[in-house]
Image (cartoon, rainbow, N blue to C red):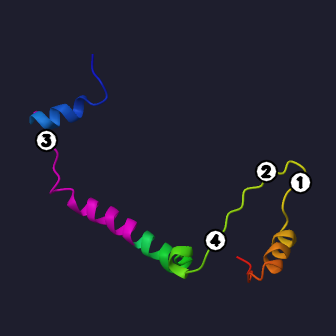
Amino acid sequence: MKTRFAGLGRLYRGETTFDFIGRRMIGFAVSLVIVVAGAGSLLIQGLELGIDFRGGVAWEVPSNSSAGELTDEDARAVLDANNIESTSA
């Protein structure tokens, strides 16, 4: 019974050969495409720096209320009532 990994076993035991050196240009081309795609993505989209790099504080407030959701206006009112500066994210 052959498994789909039988080829890897033969390669490991030396029963089969693969011309890595002869196909190195294919590997170089694939690597170059991946590197260029990654660099292009970085240049186009830029980095999305989280709060760790920007500095500041993030608060996550769980809501146990089943009556409704906490709106942005309600949250800002609570922050303003406690003299805490609020910004939009």
What numbered label is drawn on residue 13?
Answer: none
* Type of amino acid at the residue the image marks with label 4: Ala
Of 66 and 42, which appears nearest the observer? 66
Q: Residues within 10 Å of mark 2 (few under 14, many from 20)?
A: few
* Type of amino acid at the residue the image marks with label 3: Thr
Q: Residues within 10 Å of mark 3 (few under 14, many from 20)?
A: few
- The Cα–Cα distance between marks 2 and 1, rounded to whole angstroms, is 9 Å
Residue annotated with mark 4: 58
Question: Could you say whether the residue bearing mark 2 is in a helix, strand or loop?
Answer: loop
Query: Between tags 3 and 4, which lies in front?
Result: 4
* Type of amino acid at the residue the image marks with label 1: Gly
Residues marked 4 and 2 touching at CB (< 8 Å): no
Of 67 and 24, which appears nearest the observer? 67
The stretch in magenta equals: 15-35
Disc 4 or 1, which lies upstream in sequence? 4
Question: Could you say whether the residue bearing mark 1 is in a helix, strand or loop?
Answer: loop
Above/below status of 13 relative to 23: above
- The Cα–Cα distance between marks 4 and 2, rounded to whole angstroms, is 19 Å
Of 29 and 38, which appears nearest the observer? 38
Residue annotated with mark 1: 68
Visible residue check, residue 79: yes
Disc 3 or 2, which lies upstream in sequence? 3
Above/below status of 80 relative to 3: below
Residue 57 image position (x, y, % from top left)? 61, 75
